[in-house]
């Protein structure tokens, strides 16, 4: 970029409080914007001035305006959300930033709004709203379980269902239930802990305990599902990549009248014995064209944990792609 084609654009910021939120801790938000777009952002009285290549200045200005909208709605801004906002703006989808961030799925018992943070998450939530059964595949940190739990709580509060049933297969790498101490409940509790944690955050420990005692919320290993018909319930199967094809068929056919079902998992974290096909992958293939069943694919772009999680997932995906290419090359020799 030469000085002759550099331009400046001024953006007004409503207050010093908004300015502090825009810049972030140690100015990391604006540093991220500068690094990603190759511009400079300078604070001036009543706003900021963006300087750089005309196209990138316009991109940065659009992103900052959208970030301001989020700040006015008291939403948190961080580097991962800024990067995602930049991606959407580059794709010509800047209008999705406000649309995605503005969709409140649930307000927790402490008053915290749970919202979609990516376009993939919004599609996932909409698929749950629209379909009786949703099968979602995606890497760790994409909010598959958390958002499904939030939708289940909403359905219960709206009296769309009379109970919530949460389940996981008790299969983990290198561990077997028989080697864990305690009775059956003690043995399966570690596998179900992420489900408990999400519920405690959303509705509070006391409410959870009261609803569990009344049978309104049930958290149980998948083995407890066999032989049952689950009516008038919101049913979530988590970590579904660790079901066998037979277990998946058994689970899906538990669906009863007035119920909704969400099945989710990560196809890269299958802990089944060698030679056992994942029931999740089987279900995606078999059910993709069945009416009233939504099949969702979330990606690394939808990761909302620490920004390093997205980088870790991308690194593993690159490694897997190289390994697959090497195997194809060896097969041709």
Image (spheres, rainbow, N blue to C red):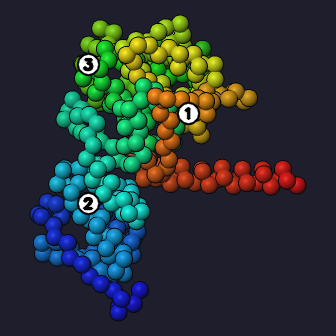
In the rendered image, residue 135, in percent from the top left (x then y), is placed at: 50, 32
Q: Earlier in the sequence, mark 2 or mark 3?
A: 2
Residue located at (42% from left, 46% from top): 120
Query: Would you identify the image quadrant in which residue 122 lies?
Result: top left
Of mark 3 and mark 1, the one earlier in the sequence is 3
Select label 2 or label 1 by which is in front. 1
Viewer-nearest of labels 3 and 1? 1
Q: Nearer the viewer, residue 156 or 123?
A: 123
Q: Residues within 10 Å of mark 2 (few under 14, many from 20)?
A: some
Location of mark 2 (residue): 66
The residue located at (34%, 70%) in the rendering is 59
Where disc 2 sits, the SS reads: helix
Spatial CA span between label 3 and label 1: 30 Å
Residue 159: assigned label: 3
Residue occupying image coordinates x 49% and y 29%: 291
User: What residue is disc 1 on?
Assistant: 289
Q: Quadrant of the C terminus?
A: bottom right
């Amino acid at each position: 970029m030469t000085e002759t084609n550099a331009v400046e654009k001024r953006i007004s910021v409503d207050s010093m409080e908004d300015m502090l939120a825009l810049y972030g801790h140690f100015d990391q938000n604006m540093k991220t914007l500068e690094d990603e777009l190759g511009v400079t952002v300078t604070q001036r009285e009543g706003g900021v001035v963006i300087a750089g290549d005309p196209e990138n200045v316009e991109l940065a200005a659009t992103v900052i305006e959208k970030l301001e909208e989020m700040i006015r709605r008291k939403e948190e801004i961080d580097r991962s959300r800024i990067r995602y906002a930049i991606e959407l703006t580059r794709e010509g989808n800047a209008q999705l930033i406000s649309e995605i961030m503005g969709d409140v799925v649930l307000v927790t018992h402490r008053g915290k709004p749970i919202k979609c943070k990516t376009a993939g998450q919004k599609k996932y939530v909409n698929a749950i709203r629209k379909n009786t059964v949703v099968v979602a595949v995606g890497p760790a940190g994409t909010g598959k379980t958390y958002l499904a739990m939030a939708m289940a709580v909403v359905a219960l509060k709206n009296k769309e269902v009379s109970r919530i049933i949460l389940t996981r297969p008790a299969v983990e790498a290198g561990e077997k239930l028989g080697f864990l101490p305690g009775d059956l409940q003690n043995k399966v509790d570690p596998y179900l802990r992420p489900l408990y944690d999400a519920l405690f955050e959303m509705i509070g420990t006391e409410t959870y305990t009261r609803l569990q005692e009344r049978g309104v919320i049930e958290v149980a290993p998948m083995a407890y599902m066999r032989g049952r018909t689950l009516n008038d319930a919101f049913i979530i199967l988590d970590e579904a990549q660790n079901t066998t094809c037979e277990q998946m068929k058994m689970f899906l056919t538990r669906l009863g009248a007035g119920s909704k079902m969400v099945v989710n998992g990560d196809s890269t974290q299958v802990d089944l014995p060698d030679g056992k096909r994942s029931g999740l992958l089987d279900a995606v293939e078999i059910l993709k064209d069945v009416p009233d069943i939504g099949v969702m694919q979330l990606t690394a772009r939808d990761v909302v944990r620490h920004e390093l999680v997205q980088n870790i997932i991308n690194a593993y995906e690159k490694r897997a792609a190289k390994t697959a290419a090497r195997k194809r090359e060896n097969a041709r020799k």
